[in-house]
Structure formats: structure tokens, C-alpha cells
């Protein structure tokens, strides 16, 4: 227990030197020579940046589902050779109703409605009211759909934000239909708001027989460039969900967006362009027509191109949105806060000062009460701080004010462990043990207590990290790392320093 081989000592010293090297990138400028360069990223409260609270439009989600349900009902009734009169949607009541063409068809029409496949279990309820057949979206099922939509939105928001190059954004759910977004280092979030405020649902439709007038089965949509409106067929011929890739490109010295479809999308695109040569084909993004070219020849390669008045930024943003996927419903910004770099710098200064003051007081206390052994505890404490920063740097972790509080608390916990060891050694000396026996027995009895207490704290903070969010998660991260480094510096490094001192001096009395 009290013997350190040369190899073991070299291993301990090597770990300390590697930790010091990993800390250096946080304090010096990156050299021009290509080297691995890992740094601790500063959180929103330290670096400054933007905070956005986004809300999912669940009413739009319900409207889209009713619109889709209407198409299913129409197709199902027509496929069964059944007629219908006065089909109506009620978004407020979440119902779709119609009158059967004839009373003799009522039972068959009801069977068609009951055979419609729901998107989620128990989503639809079929009833009759005032002679009309009514399909109602159940509230419980809509809540399930809304929850799934928020989960999908979080993933899509993450893909969009990552594509902008934002460093370590924080994206989390809040409540049933809200998403919290923190963007360190981004003080002007207008581009991010534009990216997130776009649903990016792209669809491809044939133009109606009368392009300037809406007729049954068509909808009048405005051109995005302000060039009037066109009546497009309600039926979606190719869905943008079948895109596999999108990229900004140059075409005839102008910016454009190239599209590539997956197998299903390529088949649909080839079929439509083959069957409707000479007709106009509208590319619709969020209910606005991007372009409506004429199909000159069949397109069977599964690739296409959107041209228009694009700039380099707008073409790149559109390609980014299409690659990330369409949001299931629009997101709106309900709260926005910006933290300036000066406030972040003030927070860093306050955090560093608190760490420095706490460290100095702890060092002075240990020197005053435990003399030489207190000095070794202080050396281990400094190494502990270096190792925490090294591990955070190695994994590119984000440091926030709660994280700095966690580091300060870790230093206090590390001092507790050293105090326990020194007090145990004092007790053994008072019992009349010789110096070497007092050292060995003191370390042995303190070790089990230190390991047990740190193990329970480690498990508790791992649970905080797993189930916590935001500030709680960062606090738990620094303490979890700190517990591991504390065990190493207290039970290995400080013991090695004491053992090497005793081996060289062989004192008759311990300075503790």
C-alpha cells in the first residue's frame, strides 16, 4: 500500500503532464501548425448568445390531418362507387361530415369510413348527426400526434441548426408543445429564426385546367416572386419527403437548387413527367409556388433543379431546409432573449474570481492546519482542477455558470477527502503508532470511507446528468468528472507525494 514502483510513479506523473497539455488550448492562441486542438466551449451565460422559445402550431397539425382525412374519404367512397353530398370540415370541432348520396348507400358509406386506417390507435370515431355521417378526430389521439410532432420537430431543428455551424446549441422540450433553443455565440438570431420559421414542406403539383381560376379540386396559390397566382391541383403528385438530397449549385451563371429523389420519389417523378409532357408542373414550398415550368420531356433520372431569383445565401438556406426535412407543423417564436458578449465576459470574470478565491482560501487552510501534508494536499488539489479542465476540453464539453459552481464544489469535496486522511493519521499517532504504521493505517481506514461516499455521490450525479436538462445537466457533469479526478488525486497522487517524502527523510515524527 505504501510502496510506489518507478513505473507506477512515471504513470502518475505522465497522467498529470498529459492533463496539463490538454488544458493549454484554453489559455493560448491556436498555432498555425495543424495540431489536435480541443477546448472547453462556453455556454450561453458565459459566452453570450441567443435564447429562443419556440411553439408548435397544433391547430395547423389538426387542420392538415383533417385535410388528409378528407382526401382519404373521397378516394375511399369513389373506389366503392358511392356518392356524397356537401362534404364539410370543421377545424374547431375536429370533424369531417357529409351526406350520403342515397339512403341506401348509408350503411356502405359508414363501412368505408370505419375501414380508414388511423394514423395513431383509436384516432377516429364514426357517428351520425342530423342525417350526416361524421368522422371525429379524438382529442387523446391528437395529443399523441402532437407529442410525436414535437419529437420530430426537435430532431429537424437540431439538423437545421447543426448545418449552420452553430457550436454546441442546446435544444430541449418544454411542456407539451414548446422547444427551448439556446445558441451560444450567436447574438443576431434572425437567420436562425428564418430557418426555423419555415416549415419547408415541398410538394409537386400539376397546374389546373384553368391556371388563373380556382375550380373544384384546385387551389389558387401565389408565386413566391410576386408574379401573380396559379391554380394548382390539390392532389400531391410528388412529395418532398421523398427527397434524398438537395444542394445549392450554379446553373447558367445563376444560383439554383439541385434535387435528388429516393427510389419512390424518382418513380413518381418519372411517371408524372412521362404522362404529362407539355403541361406545367408547380413546385410548391409552404403553400407558395417557387416555380412552375413546363414539362418538356420525361425526367427519369430521379433528379431535378429549382431555378429562380436565388442568391448564394437563399439557395444554400433552401437546400439546407430540404435536406433537414419538413417540420410537421409551423414553429413560432414566442420568446426571445439575447445575452451580449459583455455580460458573458462579466459572468466569466465573476466565475473565475470565485474559483480563485475559493482555491486560495482552501490552500491557506490546508497549509495552516496540516503543514507539509497540507502542501501535498494543495498540490493534489491543483492537479485535480487541471484534470477536470483537461477532461472537459478533451470531449469539447460546454461550461456554464452552474458548471463552474460544480467545479468549486468538487474542490471542496476533494479537500474533505484530504482532511479525512490527515485526521486519520493524527488519530493513529495519538494511539502511539510509529510514523510508517500511522501513515499506512490512516490511509487504509480513510480509503474505504472516501470511496463509499464518493461512489454514492457519483451515482446520484449520474442520475442528474441522465434525467436533468440545461443548467442541472452541466452542474452534474462537472461534479461527476470531479469525483473521478478527486479519487485519483487524493488516493494516488497525494499518497505518492507523502510516500516519496517519507522514503527520502525517514522522519521520527510526522508533520501533521
Image (tube, helix red, strand yellow):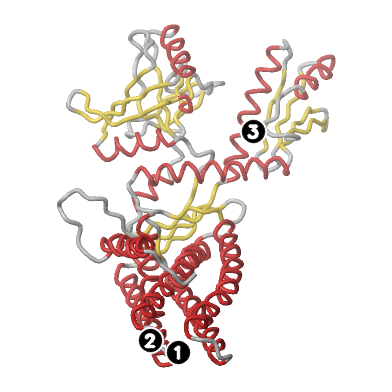
Element under disc 3:
helix
Q: Residue at x 55, y 84 (%)?
A: 424
- Residue 487 lies, with reference to residue 152, above or below; the image says below
Sequence-wise, the earlier of marks 3 and 1 is: 3
Percent position of residue 179, x then y: 52, 53
Do the residues bearing badges 2 and 3 touch, measured as CB atoms within 8 Å?
A: no
Marks 3/1: CA–CA distance: 79 Å
Instruction: Check contact, mark 1 vs mark 2: CB within 8 A.
Output: yes
Do we see residue 83 in this rendering? yes
**Disc 2 target residue:** 372
Mark 1 to mark 2: distance in Å?
7 Å
Q: Nearer the viewer, residue 408 or 274?
A: 408
Circle 1 residues within 10 Å: few <14, some 14–19, many ≥20: some
Q: Which residue is drawn at 41% across and 22% down?
A: 282
Q: Nearer the viewer, mark 3 or mark 1?
A: 1
* Residue 512, disc: 1
Relative image position of residue 30 (x, y in whole percent): 20, 57
Number of residues whose C-alpha sits closer than 10 Å to that of mark 2, classed few (under 14), some (14–19) or many (20 or more): some
Q: Relative to residue 361, is residue 454 drawn left or right?
A: right
In this view, 237 is above or below 336: above
Work out whether residue 49 can be spotted. Answer: no
Return the residue at label 3.
Answer: 66
In this rendering, the answer to whether 511 lies above or below 492 is below
Classify the position of the C terminus by image quarter: bottom left
Can you say whether 24 is above or below 289 in the image? Answer: below
- Circle 1 SS class: loop
Which is nearer the eye, 444 or 51? Answer: 444
**Closest to the observer, 400 or 268:** 400
Q: Return the residue nearer the eye: 56 or 187.
A: 187
In this view, the mark in front (2 or 3): 2
Amino acid at each position: 500500500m505504501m510502496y510506489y514502483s518507478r513505473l507506477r510513479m512515471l504513470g502518475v506523473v505522465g497522467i498529470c503532464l498529459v492533463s496539463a497539455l490538454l488544458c493549454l488550448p484554453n489559455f493560448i492562441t491556436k498555432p498555425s501548425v495543424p495540431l489536435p486542438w480541443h477546448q472547453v466551449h462556453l455556454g450561453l451565460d458565459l459566452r453570450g448568445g441567443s435564447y429562443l422559445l419556440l411553439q408548435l402550431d397544433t391547430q395547423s397539425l389538426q387542420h392538415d390531418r383533417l385535410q388528409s382525412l378528407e382526401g382519404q374519404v373521397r378516394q375511399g367512397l369513389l373506389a366503392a362507387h358511392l356518392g356524397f353530398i356537401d362534404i364539410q370540415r370543421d377545424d374547431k370541432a375536429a370533424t369531417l361530415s357529409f351526406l350520403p348520396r342515397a339512403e341506401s348507400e348509408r350503411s356502405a358509406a359508414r363501412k368505408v369510413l370505419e375501414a380508414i386506417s388511423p394514423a395513431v390507435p383509436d384516432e377516429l370515431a364514426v357517428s351520425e348527426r342530423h342525417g350526416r355521417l361524421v368522422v371525429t378526430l379524438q382529442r387523446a389521439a391528437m395529443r399523441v400526434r402532437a407529442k410525436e410532432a414535437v419529437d420530430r420537430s426537435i430532431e429537424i431543428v437540431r439538423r437545421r441548426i447543426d448545418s449552420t455551424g452553430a457550436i454546441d446549441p442546446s435544444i430541449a422540450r418544454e411542456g407539451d408543445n414548446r422547444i427551448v433553443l439556446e445558441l451560444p455565440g450567436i447574438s443576431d438570431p434572425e437567420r436562425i429564426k428564418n430557418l426555423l420559421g419555415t416549415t419547408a414542406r415541398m410538394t409537386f403539383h400539376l397546374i389546373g385546367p384553368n391556371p388563373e381560376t380556382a375550380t373544384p379540386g384546385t387551389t389558387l396559390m401565389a408565386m413566391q416572386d410576386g408574379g401573380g397566382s396559379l391554380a394548382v391541383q390539390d392532389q400531391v403528385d410528388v412529395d418532398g419527403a421523398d427527397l434524398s438530397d438537395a444542394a445549392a449549385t450554379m446553373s447558367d451563371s445563376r444560383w439554383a437548387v439541385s434535387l435528388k429523389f429516393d427510389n419512390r420519389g424518382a418513380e413518381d417523378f418519372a411517371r408524372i413527367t412521362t404522362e404529362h409532357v407539355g403541361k406545367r408542373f408547380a413546385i410548391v414550398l409552404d403553400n407558395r409556388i417557387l416555380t412552375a415550368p413546363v414539362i418538356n420531356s420525361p425526367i427519369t433520372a430521379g433528379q431535378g433543379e429549382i431555378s429562380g431569383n436565388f442568391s448564394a445565401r437563399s439557395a444554400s438556406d433552401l437546400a439546407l431546409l430540404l435536406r433537414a426535412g419538413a417540420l410537421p407543423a409551423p414553429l413560432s417564436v414566442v420568446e426571445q432573449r439575447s445575452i451580449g458578449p459583455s455580460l458573458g465576459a462579466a459572468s466569466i470574470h465573476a466565475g473565475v474570481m470565485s474559483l480563485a478565491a475559493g482555491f486560495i482560501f482552501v490552500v491557506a487552510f490546508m497549509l495552516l492546519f496540516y503543514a507539509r501534508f497540507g502542501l501535498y494536499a494543495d498540490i493534489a488539489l491543483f492537479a485535480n482542477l487541471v484534470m477536470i479542465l483537461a477532461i472537459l476540453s478533451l470531449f469539447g464539453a460546454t461550461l456554464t455558470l452552474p458548471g463552474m459552481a460544480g467545479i468549486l464544489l468538487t474542490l471542496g469535496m476533494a479537500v474533505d477527502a484530504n482532511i479525512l486522511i490527515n485526521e486519520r493519521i493524527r488519530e493513529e499517532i495519538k494511539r502511539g503508532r510509529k510514523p510508517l504504521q500511522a501513515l499506512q493505517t490512516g490511509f487504509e481506514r480513510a480509503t474505504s470511507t472516501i470511496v463509499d461516499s464518493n461512489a454514492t455521490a457519483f451515482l446520484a450525479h449520474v442520475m442528474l446528468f441522465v434525467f436533468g436538462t440545461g443548467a442541472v445537466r452541466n452542474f452534474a457533469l462537472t461534479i461527476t468528472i470531479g469525483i473521478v479526478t478527486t479519487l485519483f488525486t487524493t488516493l494516488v497522487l497525494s499518497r505518492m507525494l507523502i510516500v516519496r517524502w517519507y522514503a527520502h527523510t525517514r522522519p521520527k515524527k510526522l508533520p501533521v
